[in-house]
Amino acid sequence: MENLHDRKIKMITTDGGGELLNQQFKELANKIGFKHNVTPPYAPEHNGIAVRANRTILDKARCLLLGSKLPHQYCAKAVNTATYLSNILPTPSRNNFSPHYMWTKRSPKIKNVGTFA
């Protein structure tokens, strides 16, 4: 992130599932200088924002698949497209700016956005 966007990572929050609870990740956090916040495993109520965001992405992906009448094999493409759309569309919670704009301070390029098919 820092090399790509010139932004410093301040904190990463993960569930306590174990994948990132190892010495190697702790050393990386110390080296880069970010805080690793761990929520209890199997407790989605502690990760409400992430759980809701993931649900919204999956709901959008299902709508894209149903609307396009494409087979289930295109599920990954639908999820990628739903994520992309969520990142470039403005939202009221961000004063009608898109996440893309909030991160880059540039308007997203939408010339390649079309019908999912």
Image (cartoon, grey):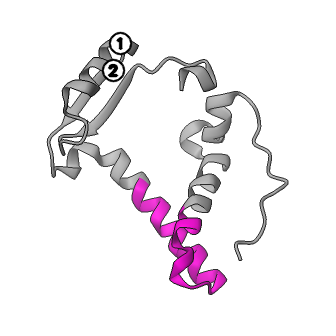
Q: Magenta stretch? A: 54-79
What's the residue type where badge 2 is placed? Leu
Q: Residue at x 58, y 61 (%)?
A: 82
Badge 2 marks a residue whose secondary structure is helix
**Per the image, is 64 magenta?**
yes
Assess disc 1: are there few (<14), some (14-19) or many (≥20) residues with their C-alpha within 10 Å of its C-alpha: few
Circle 1: element type: helix
Residue holding disc 1: 31
Residue at 57%, 83% in the rendered image: 66
Q: Quadrant of the C terminus?
A: bottom right
Residue in view at x 62 percent, y 87 percent: 69
Q: Residue furthest right?
A: 111
| Residue 22 visible to the viewer | yes
Residue 76 is situated, as x and y percent measured from the top left of the image, at 52, 66
Q: Nearer the viewer, residue 17 or 63?
A: 17
Q: Is residue 67 left or right of residue 117?
A: left
Q: Are marks 1 and 2 in contact (CB under 8 Å)?
A: yes
Single out the residue that lies furthest toward the front.
24
- Foreground pick, 3 / 99: 3
Q: Gap in Å between the C-alphas at discs 1 and 2?
A: 5 Å
> Residue tagged by mark 2?
28
Q: Is residue 16 above or below residue 116?
A: above
Place of residue 8 in the rendered image (x, y in percent of width and height, measured from the top left): 50, 17
Residue type marked 1: Lys
Q: Is residue 56 magenta?
A: yes
**Residue 62: percent from the left, percent from the top?**
51, 74
In the displayed structure, 88 sits above or below 35; it is below
Residue 90 visible to an observer of this rendering: no
**Overall secondary structure of the magenta stretch?**
helix
Mark 2: give few (<14), some (14-19) or many (20+) Cα within 10 Å. few
